Image (cartoon, rainbow, N blue to C red):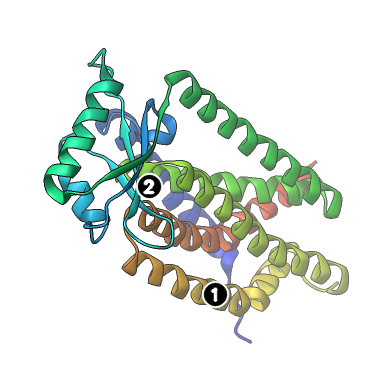
């Protein structure tokens, strides 16, 4: 087995991550003007419609292009779609105006159209959803920190959470910089990547802990390099096989599912990177600081 000296590259790796995250977030906040929030986090109207003559989501989206809608296929028999249109806050009669326009536009292009349901989502509901999402994510991270603290030690827990924060900041920065739609699917992707990254990190940390107990003639620096090298093939193979499935979704899907898949692709790559080049170096830095006390 060839030994990979991961600690040798810790400074350039961490520096590269910090620079990329800073660039993504600076572009998102100061140039793009913030995230491209989907209707899940905005006021708007949800329609469920039956359009037998519509072949796919794209033709429905084109018929309503003036409203910049989100369109997803619904049901199993085909011809049913969920249409989401955000409230632009410029029309006092938004719901009534859009409802009539959606019906008339679809009938003009497709003929037979059936509006199965129509639901208006107020701004207060959207705001509450965003707040609840943030709190649930923080609670999940806190529970993860507690679990790793109990299973390992505090230094392992903090190192793992640092890698997770790195992944979340990178992924959200990427989504914001490229103005991908920020929806509940985005939150699902972020939470999935948190679990995926932690799994990789815990596998490496478990190997570090085991080698630290068994190998007495090596420094902690060398033990980290040995442990990462022993886990490297497993980590890379797992990531590669997962990416094969996700890339297939990315290529053949569209709309929200495609954005979800792209977020997963970026997250898996970054999560694999952080479990090797972020979590372990942070653990080494903590260990070296304790030795100096």
For the point 58% across and 63% down, the residue is 276
Verify CB contact (< 8 Å) between mark 1 and mark 2: no
Name the side, left or right, on which 232 lies relative to 40. right
Q: Position of residue 207 (x, y in %)?
A: 76, 69
SS category of the residue bearing label 1: helix
Q: Which image quarter holds the N terminus?
A: bottom right
* Residue toward you, 25 or 192: 192
Look at mark 2 in the image and give the residue it sits on.
Answer: 174
Labels 1 and 2: the sequence-earlier one: 2
Q: Which residue of the protein is positioned furthest toward the top in this rendering? A: 92
Q: Position of residue 177 (x, y in %)?
A: 32, 42
Image: 54 above or below 292: below
The answer for how far apart the CA atoms under marks 1 and 2 are is 22 Å
The answer to whether residue 16 of the structure is visible from this angle is: yes
- Residue 141: name its quadrant: top right
- Residue 142: name its quadrant: top right
Image: 248 above or below 2: above
Q: Position of residue 53 (x, y in %)?
A: 21, 57
Image: 240 above or below 152: below
* Residue toward you, 162 or 147: 147
Image: 30 above or below 83: above
For the point 40% across and 67% down, the residue is 249
The answer to whether residue 167 of the structure is visible from this angle is: no
Q: Position of residue 169 (x, y in %)?
A: 48, 42
- Residue 134: name its quadrant: top right
Q: Which image quarter holds the C terminus?
A: top right
Q: Which residue of the protein is positioned furthest toward the bottom in this rendering? A: 1
* Residue toward you, 95 or 123: 95
For the point 23% across and 57% down, the residue is 54
Look at mark 1 in the image and give the residue it sits on.
Answer: 236
For the point 57% across and 34% down, the residue is 133
């Amino acid at each position: 087995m060839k030994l990979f000296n991961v600690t040798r590259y810790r400074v350039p790796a961490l520096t590269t991550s910090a620079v990329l995250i800073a660039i993504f977030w600076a572009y998102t906040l100061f140039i793009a003007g913030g995230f491209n929030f989907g209707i899940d986090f905005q006021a708007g109207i949800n329609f469920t419609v039956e359009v037998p003559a519509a072949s796919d989501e794209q033709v429905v989206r084109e018929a309503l292009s003036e409203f910049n809608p989100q369109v997803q296929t619904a049901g199993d028999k085909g011809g049913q779609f969920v249409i989401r249109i955000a409230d632009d806050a410029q029309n006092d009669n938004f719901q009534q105006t859009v409802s009539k326009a959606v019906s008339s536009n679809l009938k003009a292009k497709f003929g037979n159209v059936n509006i199965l349901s129509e639901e208006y989502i107020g701004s207060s509901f959207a705001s509450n959803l965003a707040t609840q999402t943030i709190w649930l994510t923080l609670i999940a991270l806190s529970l993860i920190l507690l679990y790793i603290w109990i299973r390992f030690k505090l230094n392992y827990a903090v190192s793992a959470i640092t890698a997770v924060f790195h992944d979340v900041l990178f992924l959200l920065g990427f989504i914001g910089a490229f103005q991908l739609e920020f929806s509940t699917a985005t939150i699902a992707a972020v939470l999935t990547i948190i679990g995926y990254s932690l799994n990789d990190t815990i596998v490496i940390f478990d190997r570090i802990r085991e080698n630290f107990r068994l190998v007495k003639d090596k420094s902690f620096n060398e033990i980290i390099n040995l442990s990462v090298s022993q886990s490297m093939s497993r980590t890379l193979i797992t990531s590669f096989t997962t990416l094969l499935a996700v890339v297939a979704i990315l290529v053949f899907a569209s709309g929200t599912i495609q954005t979800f898949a792209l977020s997963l692709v970026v997250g898996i790559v970054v999560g694999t990177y952080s479990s090797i080049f972020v979590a372990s170096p942070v653990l080494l830095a903590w260990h070296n600081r304790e030795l100096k006390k």
